[in-house]
Image (cartoon, rainbow, N blue to C red):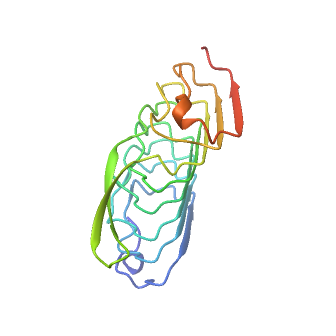
Amino acid sequence: RFPAWIRDVQVKNLTSLTLNHCINCRVLSLGQLSRLQSLSLKGNLELEEWIDAPYHFLHRLNISNCPKLRDTPKIFLNLGAMKIKKCNSLKALPLIPSVMFLKLMHNLVLEDFNEHTVILGSVNNHGQPVHVRQPSFIKLLELKVIDCPKLPCLPEVFAPQKLEVSGCPLLTKLPTPEFSQRLQHLAIDACDD
């Protein structure tokens, strides 16, 4: 675990955090960093689990070379950009209903996008609360998937502008025509079908 001064909100105004090569960290617990907008985890070779309260303002998440990481927080409501690279124990993504840019690279056991219909709360023009149902990847504009050999499919409901897929032998279909109208850039390489 990390020092109490991080977990006990003594750095409550922190908006960006990078944790590189924390070789003795097995469980990531950062406490209530309520203003955190950007988080980068790189080269934490022993990190297995990330348990925490939700990060309401987290907009950018980069996890790279954390080969033992198998659990993350279950949901990131406002995450706009996420990159996961060389996390060879992570089988499923967290729920990320606001993600617009997603890169998945060299994740050997990743098999689940964790696609769901989510119910989001908002306020209408009259100031009344409204609940909106939306597919979890409907805002996704750019998806790059490289060398994720266990991934059986792309999200079913998403309308990307840019889609790149390479080294994913189990993938057999692209977005349906109704969701591919925004597609401007398509690159497919080293996929069996």
**Residue positioned 39% across, 48% down in the render:** 94
Above or below 28: residue 85 = above
- Name the quarter where the C terminus is drawn: top right
**Residue 131, x across and y down, in percent:** 28, 61
Res. 11 in view: yes
**Residue 179, x across and y down, in percent:** 53, 37
Q: For residue 163, what is the image quadrant?
A: top right
> Front-most of 125 and 58?
125
**Residue 29, x across and y down, in percent:** 37, 64
Instruction: State the count of labels.
Output: 0
**Residue positioned 52% across, 30% down in the render:** 108
In-image side of 153 versus 16 (left or right): left
Res. 107 in view: no
Q: For residue 112, what is the image quadrant?
A: top left
> Front-most of 57 and 39?
57
Which residue is the extreme one toward the top?
193
> Front-most of 58 and 177?
177
Q: For residue 114, what is the image quadrant?
A: top left
Above or below 69: residue 156 = above
**Residue 153, x across and y down, in percent:** 48, 27
